[in-house]
Image (spheres, rainbow, N blue to C red):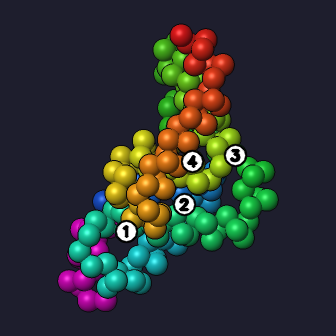
């Protein structure tokens, strides 16, 4: 890969590092493993950058991250289930900044994280891609290599299952 192609890669793919990490973190459930998955995905993306034909570099990269996470998950499933991601520990907020409102938001975030963790991977994946990464249905279909109808129904079922998992908390909040 020449300097021009490397510069093009950096321009098209590198800006999506946060989205790649967010998706990997929710798929593999561990920050360090997510970093490994993203690193592997970026190496694969760099190695196969010549296969990107137009299109959206973000969607292309997230599809690679998804595939790397699935490969990782198959190889280390039992290990990944034993080490859940701790949102509060890795949020970057200092202990001195804990106000009552921050604590409430932290509790809500933890409740949501736990509910997401209970979803099957195919449901968690579409929720993360749509709600956290902001991908359109078409982009999710492209990233997951699924028909758009499948994405729409899977997202509807994922939202219903997430609401069901949040049921008691949502009812308490009114």
Q: How many marks?
A: 4
Q: Residue furthest bottom?
A: 2
Q: Residue at x 55, y 42 (%)?
A: 158
**Mark 1: which secondary structure?**
helix
In space, the residues marked 3 and 2 are separated at their CA atoms by 15 Å
Q: Residue at x 57, y 58 (%)?
A: 34
Q: Position of residue 15 (x, y in %)?
A: 30, 59
Q: Which mark is residue 143?
A: none
In the rendered structure, the answer to whether residue 117 lies left or right of residue 57 reads right
In the rendered view of the protein, which quadrant contains the N terminus?
bottom left
Q: Nearer the N terminus, badge 3 or badge 2?
A: 2
One can see residue 78 in this view: yes
Q: Nearer the N terminus, badge 1 or badge 3?
A: 1
Q: Which residue is mark 2?
A: 35
Q: Position of residue 96 (x, y in %)?
A: 52, 22
Q: Residue at x 46, y 67 (%)?
A: 145
Q: Which residue is mark 3?
A: 84
**Mark 3: which secondary structure?**
loop
Residue situated in front as seen by the camera: 4 or 153: 153
Q: Which residue is mark 1?
A: 60
Q: Where, by quadrant of the figure, is residue 113 drawn?
A: top right
Taking the magenta stretch, the answer to whether it contains residue 3 is yes
In the rendered structure, the answer to whether residue 93 lies left or right of residue 117 reads left
Q: Which residue is mark 4?
A: 124
In space, the residues marked 1 and 3 are separated at their CA atoms by 27 Å
Secondary structure that dominates the magenta span: helix
Q: Nearer the N terminus, badge 1 or badge 2?
A: 2
């Amino acid at each position: 890969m020449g300097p021009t192609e490397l510069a093009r890669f950096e321009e098209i793919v590198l800006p999506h590092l946060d989205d790649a990490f967010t998706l990997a973190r929710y798929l593999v459930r561990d920050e360090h493993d997510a970093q490994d998955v993203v690193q592997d995905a970026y190496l694969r993306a760099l190695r196969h950058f010549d296969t990107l034909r137009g299109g959206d570099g973000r969607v292309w990269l997230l599809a690679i991250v998804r595939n790397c996470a699935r490969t990782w998950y198959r190889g280390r499933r039992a290990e990944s289930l034993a080490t859940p991601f701790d949102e509060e520990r890795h949020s970057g907020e200092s202990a001195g900044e804990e106000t009552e409102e921050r604590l409430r938001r932290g509790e809500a975030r933890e409740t949501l994280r736990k509910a997401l963790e209970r979803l099957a991977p195919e449901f968690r994946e579409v929720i993360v891609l749509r709600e956290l990464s902001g991908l359109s249905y078409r982009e999710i279909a492209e990233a997951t290599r699924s028909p758009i109808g499948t994405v729409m129904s899977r997202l509807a079922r994922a939202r219903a299952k997430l609401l069901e998992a949040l049921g008691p908390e949502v009812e308490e909040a009114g």
